[in-house]
Image: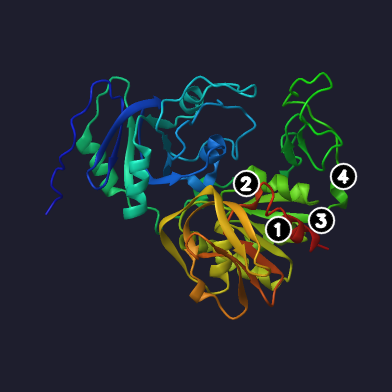
Amino acid sequence: MADAKPSHAPQPDGATGVLVLASGDVLWGHGFGAEGQAVGEVCFHTAMTGYQEIMTDPSFAGQIITFTFPHIGNVGANPDDVEADEPHALGMIVREDPTAPSNFRAAENLVGWMKRHARIGLAGIDTRALTRRIRGGGAPNGVIAHSADGTFDLDLLLNMAREWPGLEGMDLAKAVTRETHGTWGDDRASGIWRLGFGYETRPSTSSGQTEEDGSAPSPVRTEPVEARAPSDRPHVVAIDYGSKHNIFRNLVQAGAKVSVVPAETDFATIMALNPDGIFLSNGPGDPAATGEYAVPVIRQLLETDKPLFGICLGHQLLGLAVGARTTKMFQGHRGANHPVKRLSDGAVEITSMNHGFAVERDSLPANARETHVSLFDGSNAGLELTDKPAFSVQYHPEASPGPQDSFYLFERFVGSLR
């Protein structure tokens, strides 16, 4: 029998946005950004800063993000604070209406940025209540919609939410990967970003905090600080399953030159690039689905005994390649303050996480050693092979919320090359 039509609160006066969950719950609010509707998984993110980086992270493809921090949009938007060339999250849900930006780096306001990139925003939602719902019932499917005149077909939106199949079994890497391979290292991305000096490959002698007259530095000034010529650097071939720009910046910062290839690149093409090491990137979707084409290639790469490093989806794919299993998490991990214990010495790293699937610890084979665990729920957060030079972590070490607790992973990887 078809699901009965749900009852819900009537539309309030002035409501121009709505979230319709597959359960039938309807949450009214104020729409901003682009008009239209989008269907996906509704999740929450606990970071207090970095909303542009979060919205442009390809790992959020297929998802609608509820921000638990109430003041999203107050520093505006700029062309530097992005992790991809366009947003991949479908939309955002926030407590307060975005205000005019108050930051000297802002090039536009968040509302205009969202509209320009065809992304839907919904404000005026009780994000605490929605977050509690997700924590208690898991991440639901839902539709976010914005109509300037307040006209919505709730039956249509409900059907969209209920008919969407969900992320389990969905391969999204193909949708977000680059189409051709190329070298990483344009003028935006030669290394990590430092306020006042743009992107660079080693620390400068200046603090980058103020000019001689005490004024704030320009965020667009750059400094030629190449530590080593590209020809002298070990060569990393990165497989792009939905990569973030800052991962490549950190690889460069650690001393590598980087070539990036699409997700479905075959073993022969990768080896023709003569890599010294292989990097498996983050990305969205179900690792088991992406693994249909990625795992056979990773297994071939492991047989070369070249060093291999994986992050997030790359971590899950490495686990699958050695015979482990992955599973859909109840609510996932998404935030910038996730504590992870390093088992080798008991140190705790404060990490950034964004994943809805995890490697099952009990399925790890004898040649795979667990290296890190989440202190939130005890789930696996890292592994290394005992018979191959390969390791991976579930979290995002390039995000540096600690602020640089995990940069050693890039140094370890690049230092093992050649």
**Residue holding disc 1:** 409
Q: Which residue is mark 4?
A: 227
Q: Position of residue 99 (x, y in %)?
A: 47, 22
**Label 3 vs 1, first from the N-terminus:** 3
Callout 1 amino acid: Leu
Around disc 3, counting alpha carbons within 10 Å, would you say few (fewer than 14), some (14 to 19), or many (20 or more)?
Answer: some
Tell me which numbered mark, 4 or 3, is placed earlier along the sequence: 4
- Between disc 2 and disc 4, the foreground one is 2
Labelled pair 2, 3 in contact (Cβ < 8 Å): no
Please report whichever mark, 2 or 3, sits nearer to the chain's N-terminal start: 3
Q: Position of residue 238 (x, y in %)?
A: 67, 54
289 over 107 or under it: above or below: below
Would residue 79 appear left or right of 217 to someone viewing this image? left
Q: Circle 3 is placed at which residue position?
A: 234
Residue 225 seen: yes
Disc on the earlier residue, 4 or 1: 4
